[in-house]
Image (cartoon, helix red, strand yellow):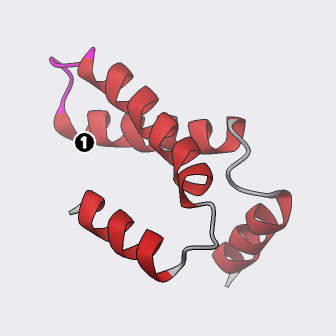
Amino acid sequence: LFVLGFYWMRKECSNLPLLRIVIKPILAAVLMGLIVYQLPEWKLPLIILTGGSIYCLGLFLLKVVSAEEINLIKQGLRI
């Protein structure tokens, strides 16, 4: 499904550097997967929470999310 969506986006938005856009989130997902894979005996809710936290941390460390976007998220959580 991802490959089909990527192909369609590449075809429709040929001037966007799609590979550069998706590579960092993919790296964050791979990091999350490698760490979560090492936790097979943990309870599922704890694995989900840990995986989500690791993914968010990976996005932050890879600078996928800008400071402005983080501020928007904080403002949205206050509502």
Residue 32 placement (x, y as % from top left): 41, 32
Which of the pair 30/72 is nearer the observer?
Answer: 30
Give residue 35's quadrant in the image.
top left
Residue 69 placement (x, y as % from top left): 75, 67
Which of the pair 28/18 is nearer the observer?
Answer: 18
Residue 33 placement (x, y as % from top left): 33, 30
Q: Which residue is mark 1?
A: 45
Task: Judge the density around disc 1: few (<14), some (14-19), many (≥20) Cα neighbours within 10 Å.
Answer: few
The verdict on residue 20 being magenta is no
Identify the residue at horizontal 55%, vertical 74% (top origin).
14
Q: Specify the quadrant that holds the C terminus.
A: bottom right
Give residue 7's quadrant in the image.
bottom left
Residue 65 placement (x, y as % from top left): 70, 55
Which of the pair 19/65 is nearer the observer?
Answer: 19
Q: Please name the predominant secondary structure of the magenta segment in the image.
A: loop
Which of the pair 8/35 is nearer the observer?
Answer: 8
The verdict on residue 42 being magenta is yes
Q: Which residues are magenta?
A: 38-43
Question: What amino acid is labelled 1 in the image?
Answer: Pro
Relative to 49, say whether 7 is above or below.
Answer: below
Relative to 52, say whether 75 is above or below.
Answer: below
Report the side of 37 relative to 35 (left or right): left
Q: Specify the quadrant that holds the N terminus.
A: bottom left
Identify the residue at horizontal 79%, vertical 58% (top origin).
66
